[in-house]
Every structure is written in structure tokens, then in C-alpha cells.
Image: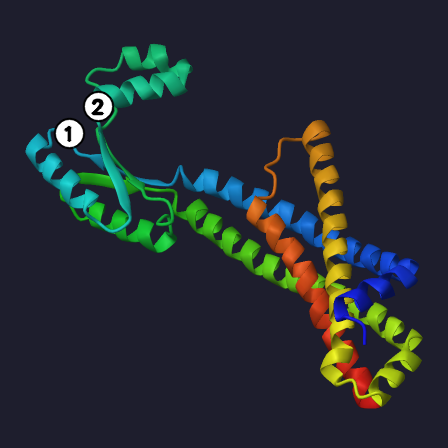
Amino acid sequence: MANPIQEAFAAIRRTPLLTGLSALMVGLALFVVGLFGLAAHNLRVALETIEERVEVVAYLRDGTDTTRVGEARRALADLPGVEAVGYVSKDSARVRAISSLPEIREVSADLEPNPFPASLEIRFLPGNRTSEAVDAVAEAAGGYDFVEDVTYGEGWVEKLFLLRRIGAVTAMIMGGAFALVATLIIGTAIRIAIFARKEEIQIMRLVGARNSFVHRPFLLEGAVTGFLGGLLALFLTAVTYRALKAFLFDLQGIPGSWILGGLAAGAILGVLASSLAVRRYLREV
């Protein structure tokens, strides 16, 4: 009996059109997954950029003792998820306001005393910018009697994290759906190949070949078909990415780990689909 690897590649050489069409169909299915992955990755990058701006600002009452402010800074900095607590004096707040809104320069110059309050700006560690952590820190900051007001954009912070959760769930559902489509395509192609070689399979079984030996060439065919489809999807996704980046807007490329995972997923889907198709056929004969 021939080696299963030799048998698999011999079968691919005998039916190059069928293998090519199968790889093309798988590649197109995985290409859609690649486009969705590209969109999901850039959405995640954009959300992370926005999340970096998430901070709690506690506005202080005028005349607050600096010792108490220092104690509050140290206590707030020790809270879980807090990266740093910065102090913005009244003069610094005035300079910031003039820099960001030049039109108030003349107005603010006539206002004495300085109407801008001092504040504490609380920044968070990456991975800890959740709505729960922000709410807890805002509540702790608001508990000091010398804190006049606490702001952190409650509405848009909640929408930001809601959008992130929706994106993650959508990615799982869409990715699973297209993976199922790719599996069905590979399985159909393998079943066609099996029926085209049914006499050969029957002869192999007559001479004593076990089902496991009959399985192996088809499993390898499925893996090769899925891998070739993954390469095609990678090429199409890369071309689309370069076109979008060159003519429409700047994008972040898909991480290398995602690319390797996609190629591995294509091969695994091929093996899975082939295994199911072969088992079903061997039960029927």
C-alpha cells in the first residue's frame, strides 16, 4: 500500500481542478473572515485609543489645604487599577483653558480672581479602564468633603464599553458563521473526491486496509485544501488592506499572530471537514 502522504498528494495531482476550486471557495469564505478581522482589529485599536483618554477629574474647592490634597492623591493612587493621580493647580487650569479655547483669552484676563478650579486627574492602567473601575474611583474621589464635583463622562464611557462588548460578540458570531461555511465547502469537495475514488477505496478495504488508513489521505487533502484557501484569503486581505490604506484612510494591519492563526484554522477546518465526510461515507458503504 502506498504511503498516506504520497497517496494524498497523488490524488491532488490527479484532480487539480477539484482541489483548486475547493481551495478557491475556502479562500473566498476565509477572505470574508479576514476582512471582518481587519475591521474588528482596527475597531479595537480605535477603542483602545479612546480608552486611553478615560480619566476621572475631581474639582477641588478653593482654599483646600495642600496637605489634605496630598493625602487624597496618595490614597486614590493606591486604588486598584489607578495608574497615576495628577494635580492641576488653578493657574495651570487657566493656562489650559486659554490654550484649548483661545477666544476666551481676553475674557479670562479680566476675570479676577482666577475662576478656574484646581483639580485631581486620575488616570487608569491599561486593561483597568472598565466602567466598574471608573465608577468606583469616581465614588471614592467624590467622598472627600473638599471635592466640589467629579466628572468622567459617564454617558460616553458606558457607550464606549458597550460598543466594545458588541464588537466582541459580533466578531465571535460572524467568525463562527464563516468558519462553518468554509467547513461545509471543504466537506462537500472531499465527498466529491471520495465518490470519484470509491472503487479504489473498496479495493483498499478488500485487501485489508483499516478505516484509519483510508482516512489519512483524505485528511491530508483536506488540510492542504484548507491551508491553500488560507493563503489565498491572506493574499486577498493584504491586497484589500493596501488599497484601503493607500486610497481611503489609514489602517492598522492584522497582527501576525492572527495571520498564523488564520492559516492554522484553515488547515484544521480542512481536517475536520474531511474527517466528517470520510466517516459518513464509510458508514454508508
Q: Give neighbour class at mark 2: few <14, some 14-19, many 20+ (Cα, 10 Å).
A: some
Q: Are marks 1 and 2 in contact (CB under 8 Å)?
A: yes
Task: Tell me if I can see residue 65 in this picture.
Answer: no
Residue at 81% x, 62% y is: 9
Q: Amino acid at mark 2?
A: Lys
Q: As displayed, is residue 90 above or below residue 255?
A: above
Give the image quarter of residue 56. Answer: top left
Picture coordinates of residue 68 (x, y %)?
8, 37
**Residue at left offset 73%, top offset 28%:** 247
Above or below — where is 236 with respect to 209? Answer: above
Residue depth check, mark 1 versus mark 2: number of the one nearer the observer: 2
* Residue at image point 43% right, 42% down: 51
Q: Is residue 144 above or below residue 266?
A: above
Q: Position of residue 178 (x, y in %)?
A: 71, 61
The part of the image, by quadrant, that contains residue 122 is: top left
Residue under label 1: 62
Label 1 vs label 2: CA separation? 9 Å
- Mark 2, secondary structure of its residue: helix
Can residue 148 be seen here? The reply is yes
Q: Secondary structure at mark 1?
A: loop
Residue at screen point 49% across, 54% down: 162
Q: Nearer the viewer, residue 114 or 34?
A: 34
Image quarter (top left, top right, bottom left or bottom right) of the C terminus: bottom right
